[in-house]
Amino acid sequence: MKGVKKGWFTPLISGLLVGVLIAVAFFVNFKQLNSANNSKLGANESAAEKTYVPPGKLDTYYLFASGGHSGNVFVYGVPSMRRIRTIPVFTPESAAGYGWTTETKKMLGKFTWGDLHHVAISETKGEYDGRALFATDIQNNRAAAIDLKTFKTVDILGPIPNLNGPHCAAFVTPNSEYIFLPTRFSAPIGHEYADVSQFKEKYKGVMGAVQYDFNKKKLHLAWEVMLPPWSYDLSDAGKKTSNGWAVMSTYNTEEANTTLEVGASQNDRDYLVIFNWKGIEKEVAKGNYKVINGAKMFDPVKTPGFVYLVPVAKSPHGVDVTPDGNYYISSGKLSPTATVYDWKKTFKAIQNKDFQGEARGLPIIRYESVRHKEVEVGLGPLHTQFDNRGNAYTTLFIDSAITKFNYKTGKVIDKIPVQYAPGHAAAAEGDSVSPDGNYLVSLNKLSKDSYLSVGPSHPESLQLIDISGEKMKMLYSAPADPEPHYAQMVKADKIKPIEVYPKDTKRPNSVWKEKDAHIVRHGKNVDVYGIAVRSHFVFDAKSKTPDVVRVNQGDKVTFHITNIDLDEDITHGLGITSYNENMEIQPGETNSFSFTADESGVFPLACTNFCSALHQEMTGYLLVKPK
């Protein structure tokens, strides 16, 4: 080529080659990136398909999650993870008039809040039976029962004597004979005064055994067990071959009386408490107890042979019995291992008195004699759930993950990250004798950057995980506010809720026809027997103004209102403007509230639940004549 300097062509060709290579590399990388993004998008689409419940279809499971210091229970549908109901339990809830009606005000008593820690579905032969849901209030020493036909709290027991912080109610025996409530805080019995310097001498732990009458819908305290001054945490009842026994975790066996963060972490091991509840039940029936503050207190030291200790890594939280009833699994929060214990070996060790000493008069079973496997699961193990293939799923608080392992072989199979710091997990039918093995929900204590910011206080999160295959797959993340401590997931077809309260003409205080609505006056007591129907109230059918109630200042007024709309989903409410009174009346239900008309004047009444096109017109008046 004339006019071209020697050596110019070579770098030009080289530059072109480099440009082509860069372009090819960019194209390849773009293609790979696009492929990866498409793969990720495909995975997200696949997850979305698995959680999508289209209009006209219903979820497969109910998830009942504790609402922590809200005092409520949150109800989700699975797999959609849609929150479908809030059940008020230990805290007033104006949306339902809970805490204003006569019945709910009586149940709540003097308390205006609760810390609802754990929930438990009633069982028959170790299977969730869908009849009732139980819960505890750790702060005010109460237990509650929720009727799953109506999704309403029907009874609250407490404060229960001698207990201080019943942490766990997910501890229902296989036929719902008992709900066990181990106390988290040791204290002097009966709240008697004793300085913490007398902790080892005057403070005690207590476990309460509560029964529920399914016909009367009432809870009652059957008996209690006196325990050493330790902190008692989660628990589980034996199943099948281990039925009649139960196990609970405990910490602070150091008996530290202050700054437990350090004081309760001195010993290398704490204990699991193994107890024969059927044996204790028989002893109490024979009169082997002492009445303390109205409770029948059984002392396992004075009557040995019913309560034993098993060493566990220090500071344990959860302890869980496998579906086959042959093993129980626990771990210390400060150890990276989970220990699988063998029930048969436990019974044999008890029979042979294979003990390694005693603590506070209770025999300590030799650890090596009952251990089945020690499994390296990760950092901060807390709680374990199960599938139907012999696998366990343990939450890891520090690792922010869940480990899957076979509890018979001890082989670790998989590990999945969650966002973040999981406390508990709930598998489909996971606390029963026959888990379904398809879904697991991780109850995470932190969410950080998972959702749109709402200020310094973030919601917690519930993450739905597919556990049907060898590898776990993340499907969905749903916010929960406030903290869900525990949850149970039950097949939807096991729950048989009513849609309308049955018409019962013999129900106290009910009125079923408009013409029968009336007002009764006895001195300063005024009872209103009225009806709510789309779209008006009738309080006094014989009056020219049937939607007006006239009282005198100082009268005690009680409204008894029956919703005579017997159509599904037509709920009425009754609120009194400026009088701080409100209640919900569901289809076919009768509800009541009482108050003193201490302020004179004219006060509008209104339906507080949108019920029809003429909902705005569904009003009336309370006229309070001055003295």
Image (cartoon, grey):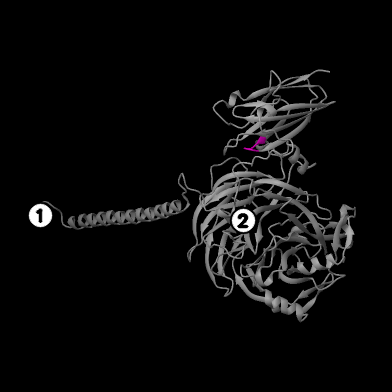
Query: Helix, strand or loop at disc 2?
Result: strand
Q: Where is residue 54 in the image (x, y as percent from the top left)?
A: 45, 46
Characterize the local packing of mark 1: few (<14), some (14-19) or many (20 or more) Cα atoms within 10 angstroms. few
Residue 333 position by quadrant: bottom right
Residue 350 visible (yes or no): yes
Q: Pick out the residue farthest to the bottom.
A: 352
Q: Nearer the viewer, mark 1 or mark 2?
A: 2
Query: Helix, strand or loop at disc 1?
Result: loop
Magenta stretch contains residue 236: no
Q: Give whichever of 359, 378 is nearer the camera.
A: 359
Tell me the number on the disc at residue 488.
2
Residue 380 visible (yes or no): no
Q: Give whichever of 200, 490 is nearer the camera.
A: 490
Quadrant location, the N terminus: bottom left
Q: Residue at x 70, y 79 (%)?
A: 369
Q: In this view, does 595 lie to the left or right of 16?
A: right
Q: Residue at x 27, y 53 (%)?
A: 23
Q: Position of residue 149 (x, y in %)?
A: 63, 48
With respect to residue 411, does 619 lie above or below?
A: above
Q: What residue range appears in magenta?
A: 584-588
Residue matched to label 1: 1
Magenta stretch contains residue 586: yes
Check disc 1 and give the amino acid type: Met
Q: Position of residue 441 (x, y in %)?
A: 56, 56
Disc 1 to disc 2, C-alpha distance = 84 Å
Q: Give whichever of 619, 266 is nearer the camera.
A: 619
